[in-house]
Image (cartoon, helix red, strand yellow):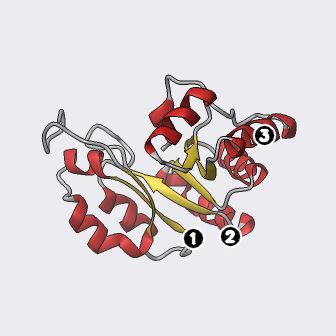
Amino acid sequence: AGFTFAHFNIDQSIAMMNRIGVADLSLKDFHLPLNSTPEKISEVLGRFKAGGINIYAVGVIYMTSKDAIDKAFDYTRKVGVPLMIGVPAPDLIDYTEQKVKEYDIRIAIHNHGPEDKLYPHPKMVYDLIKDRDKRMGLCLDIGHSQRAGADPVTMVKQYGHRIYDMHIKDVTAAQRDG
């Protein structure tokens, strides 16, 4: 997950990824803002590619309006990746599905644990998308899931067919403040 490198520049991020043998990254907007020009997109993607890093997705992108959804899908298309890790507001899920179909871009909706007002538990995401376009899925954050009382192994078994990305982190306890 690109957020891993929130406090590091692109060169530092590439060096750390190379050091531990990670070659794929979901690019976060602090390395490539959503309003980037085509030239900036090309420059940033080129730097990652030269460093041996494949950008396979963008996000996490928060979307609280139709305009924000439009901008997020346009950005994802401009970056040239088939997957967005996103958090669309639940009342905009119909509009999000329209954009998934229009752009032919998958979205993996991210759960953020017990304090999250939108998607604290992966089941909430799954229940929202299970009967929708198959390009709508989950980004299972196993640390946040554990803190919300959801066993990550069970979540993978139950929802694996719709898990399009995972965020892996450790927690100190299987509770809200863990």
Q: In the displayed image of the protein, which residue is found farthest to the front?
A: 19
In contact (CB < 8 Å): disc 3 and disc 1:
no
Label 3 vs 1, first from the N-terminus? 3
Q: Give the label, 2 or 1, closer to the camera.
A: 1
Residue 26: x and y in percent read 56, 48
Give the residue type that dot 1 points to. Arg
- 3D distance between C-alphas at marks 2 and 1: 8 Å
Query: How crowded is the residue under tag 3: few (<14 C-alpha within 10 Å), some, or many (20+)?
Result: many
Give me the residue at 31% from left, 43% from top: 169
User: To which residue does mark 3 refer?
Assistant: 41
In the structure shown, which secondary structural element does the residue marked by tag 1 occupy? loop
Circles 2, 1 touching at the beta carbon (< 8 Å): yes
Kindly identify the residue that appears in the image at 62 percent across and 30 percent down. Answer: 10
Percent x, y for residue 68? 66, 42
**Spot occupied by residue 51 in the image (x, y as percentages of width and height):** 65, 41
Q: Amino acid at mark 2?
A: Lys
Identify the residue under disc 1. 135
Using the image as rendered, state which of residue 165 and residue 44 is in the foreground: 44
Q: Callout 1 environment at 10 Å: few (<14), some (14 to 19), or many (20+)?
A: some
In the visual, does 169 lie left or right of 56? left
Q: Is residue 62 above or below residue 30?
A: below
Q: Quadrant of residue 64?
A: top right
Q: In terms of secondary structure, where does tag 2 sit?
A: helix
Q: Which residue is mark 2?
A: 101
Distance (Cα) linking label 3 and label 1: 24 Å
Which mark is first along the chain, 3 or 2? 3
